[in-house]
Amino acid sequence: MSTEVNVVGGRVAVTRLYDLAYEVDLERVERDFRESTTRLTLARARPKAVFYTRPPVDINLGRAEVGLSSGDVEVDVAARVYEFGAARLSYGVSVQGVSWTEYERLVSEMAAVLDRASPWQEDLARVKELVGPALVRPSEAGLEVDYVFATVSAFDPPLTGESVAQELDLVPLLTGDTRPLSARARQDVLRHSYSYYRDDAVIISWSRALIIEPSGDTDVADILAMAHAQLLEFRYYNDRLDAELPRMYDRIERARGAFSALARRRHASLARSLHALLAEVTEVSERIENALVVTEDVYLAKVYDAALDQYRVRAWGVAVDHKLEIIRDTYTALYDEAATARAEYLEIAIVLLIVLEIVLAFLV
């Protein structure tokens, strides 16, 4: 590993995602804060090759000072709001003319900001206040997803995307570990490495990514951010369904322990509530899955697919689908049981009417 490589230009950003609502009215956010918002677009992708179904909105929150172990730094503060209810806070600092060791140290110091409650809670409150009127069915922001983006625009001496991993030890930057990793662990950390041009590259790890992009565009980082937003939402709805299933079973047991006629009505009521939950989560799951459409751009498609794999987005989606299937089966069973009960009551009523007619005939 060369000890003389310098980072000519770059950026380090730490981000945190929250679930704020079932949905966000992005058009209202734009109308309310026209001067400080922008719709996210992809710079390098051709139209229709990669596109957002509903592009998220970025909100400029100004600048602030953040204390690091090496001193205070001034950071750009921004929020990104997604249509399916997620919001991301980010603190970014630009870097120029530092050694690779100094850059690596800055990444670790910025990552340590994620371990603090402040300034995240204060800025989250600001975002909620700003976009509050645009939130549809707000939720408590209990679940969080963190990530660190390390971006480099140029090295001195110049390095190609393929030679970066040969000239520099990227593992400490990508993991934050100071102890040497085993050979197998190092392979796992570096396995999601992609490059399109000779001078660009991206290496994706679970909690950090190194992006080498001479053009300065943010497409790769934006693609990774979308995958994180999808991860957050699938985890949120997985947790919600985990909490709902035990309550569902308890309600079924209570309904079955009630008086027969009342139990049937409770079954019908429970079936309706389950159907509403099923419809809601199914709809939002489809919106999450289709938030980003990648068709023709091979490089960004690979990066996006690798991010979905590395962050286990698909696994969380499968978990949500499995729980939805349980609820769907339960709803069908309750609906059938309620329908059967209604049919039984109708048959009993018919039989009683027939008996009544027979009795009346004899009495007359």
Image (cartoon, rainbow, N blue to C red):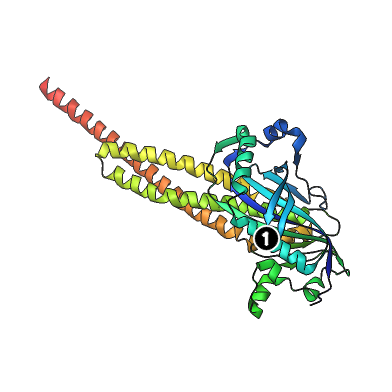
Q: Is residue 129 visible?
A: yes
Furthest residue toward bottom: 183
Which x, y percent locates residue 142? Answer: 53, 48
Furthest residue toward front: 71
Q: Residue at x 66, y 44 (%)?
A: 82
Q: Residue at x 54, y 51 (%)?
A: 143
Q: Callout 1 environment at 10 Å: few (<14), some (14 to 19), or many (20+)?
A: few
In the rendered image, the vertical position of residue 83 relative to residue 16, given as above or below: above
Quarter in which the N terminus is drawn: bottom right
Asked which quadrant contains residue 339, the reply is top left
Foreground residue among 152 and 245: 152
Left or right: where does residue 247 sit relative to residue 119?
left
Furthest residue toward top: 364
Foreground residue among 197 and 140: 140
Which x, y percent locates residue 247? Answer: 38, 47
> Residue at label 1?
69
**Callout 1 amino acid:** Ser
Disc 1 on helix, strand or loop? Answer: loop
Quarter in which the C terminus is drawn: top left
Which x, y percent locates residue 122? Answer: 61, 43
Report the number of numbered marks. Answer: 1
Q: Residue at x 70, y 31 (%)?
A: 32
In the rendered image, the vertical position of residue 288 relative to residue 115, given as above or below: above
Foreground residue among 364 and 152: 152
Furthest residue toward right: 157
Which x, y percent locates residue 198? Answer: 86, 67
Asked which quadrant contains residue 86, the reply is top right
Q: Residue at x 55, y 45 (%)?
A: 141
